[in-house]
Image: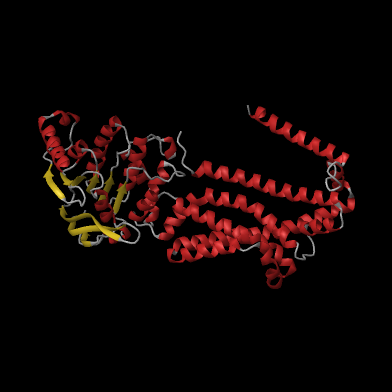
Amino acid sequence: MRLRGLIFPALGCALLLCAWEVVGRDGMLGKTLPALSQILRVYEDGPRRALLVRSTAATLDSAAAGYAVGVGLGAAVAIFAHLVPLMRGGLDRMAVLVNALPVIALGPVLIITAGREGTPAALASVPVFFLLYTSTGVGLRGASRRLEMVLITLGATRWQRLAKFQAVAALPSVLAGMKIAASSAMIGAVVGEWFGAPSGLGVVVLNSMQNFQIPLLWATVIVIAAITLSSYGLLTLGERAARRRIDECDG
Amino acid sequence: MATIALTGVTRSFLRRSGARRKQVFVALGPLDVQIGDGEFVALIGASGCGKSTVLRLLAGLDEPTTGQVQINGQPPRDLQTQHSLGIAFQEHALLPWRSVAGNLRLPFEVAGLTATEDRIDELIALAGLKGFEHVRPAQLSGGMRQRVAIARALALRPKLLLLDEPFGALDAVTRRRMNFELERIWLESRPTTLMVTHSVEEAALLADRILVLTERPGRVRLDTCVPFSRPRPAALMRTAEFHRLVDELTANLEAA
């Protein structure tokens, strides 16, 4: 059953890739869409491969740093807003404001404050912060009101309620936020590199575009997409495991 | 144990009516009720008469607009911090990621006490759930979950036990069985108890005293004692006295 469910998607993908190869070889969509085989050859070419490996490491570094900061800060601020309801309205508005700021507009400001090397991580952290602030808040507020009342009646302090109940109940929602945030961190890091970072996949994208190295451009974009998709897939597994353990399911 | 005194208690809410006007509406009271030590009191009344509000006031989850709520001469919030209240709702409200034993340990953790294995075993036996210690709530039937919730409410030997429609979500047969189970469990420690219920039979079967509330704003329409001795057998429900009490309560409920 599972296997049969995989046949059609696999067939579809293969068909699409074949079409890409044919269209690329023929050149019917111009030089900007090279054949798949031509792109794959970039990964075999020593110097360009080394460049991609080096750049991937740099971008992953920035994305991971921004991700860690954004996740930590977003969750911490959401917990703070939850514990101090007086602050919540203001913090909600601040988070929305941060999210509404166009990343491109933030770039130059960040270069001055965070430096060229720090900008990718800083830009990666912005959407992550917002997503985690929102998903943590939703998770904490979504915890059963009845259980909350039972715990208050039993004399649980605000902190005990958070530790024993709300934080655990919020976990699936937090993981859902982390899942989406992983892609955002990657995009933030790549865009951040466009503002003059010394190295990274964003730099390669920019350079190969300007120098008309079309296969290298495609090869880089594929690496970015692969990282984004695999992090999303990995965190989806984590989220599912958490839901199985934590969410109530009858049967 | 505990004696309860509600003196001149009212609870009103602000309701938005129209674009800007806010209207005060009185949901409850004025209410003057005394409940004695170890008494099992059932509170019945039409939907929306404020009976759950009374329970929330006693649990310290809500404050009266006017009047005073005192348990042993103290406000309910003090009993919260002393971990002397137990509560169970219609929804079992168990932690879904914890086993039966884990859920029963929760009140002890909250109170900063260590639950001895003996006490947990005792509570599991009380709930009639031997052999289900390590099972999660999702794997239990509705009646079993409610028994865990009630055992959890009794875990710290509370001075006051509050039950809000504890069997409201169960089917009629299970509910009847649970009523007898509750009496058995209750007789072990006889805490002062207030139970909110829709079921006249349930009230007559379990309580020492029954309060019928009027429609909004809820006031005491009838305050009657239940004369039957304990433990009450199933056969009681087929006696003329039981039917007379049920009829009287129903008549008052409908007049409300």
Residue lying furthest front: B19
Residue lying furthest right: A46
Residue B198, percent from left and from top: 24, 40
Q: What is the total number of numbered labels drawn onto the structure image?
A: 0
Relative side of A50 to B231, left or right: right
Q: Residue at x 68, y 72 (%)?
A: A113
State whether residue B104 is above or below residue B29: above
Any part of residue B14 in sight: yes
- What colouring method underlies this structural image? secondary structure
Any part of residue B159 in sight: no
Quarter of the picture holding the C terminus of chain B: top left
Q: Residue at x 69, y 46 (%)?
A: A230
Residue lying furthest bottom: A112
Q: Residue at x 33, y 57 (%)?
A: B18
Residue A1, percent from left and from top: 63, 26
State whether residue B18 is above or below residue B174: below
Of A8 and A60, the residue lying toward us: A8
Of B106 and A20, the residue lying toward us: A20
Relative side of A177 to A66, left or right: left
Residue A20, percent from left and from top: 81, 39
Q: Quadrant of residue B61?
A: bottom left
Relative side of A63 to A28, left or right: left
Q: Quadrant of residue A108?
A: bottom right
Q: Quadrant of residue B141?
A: top left
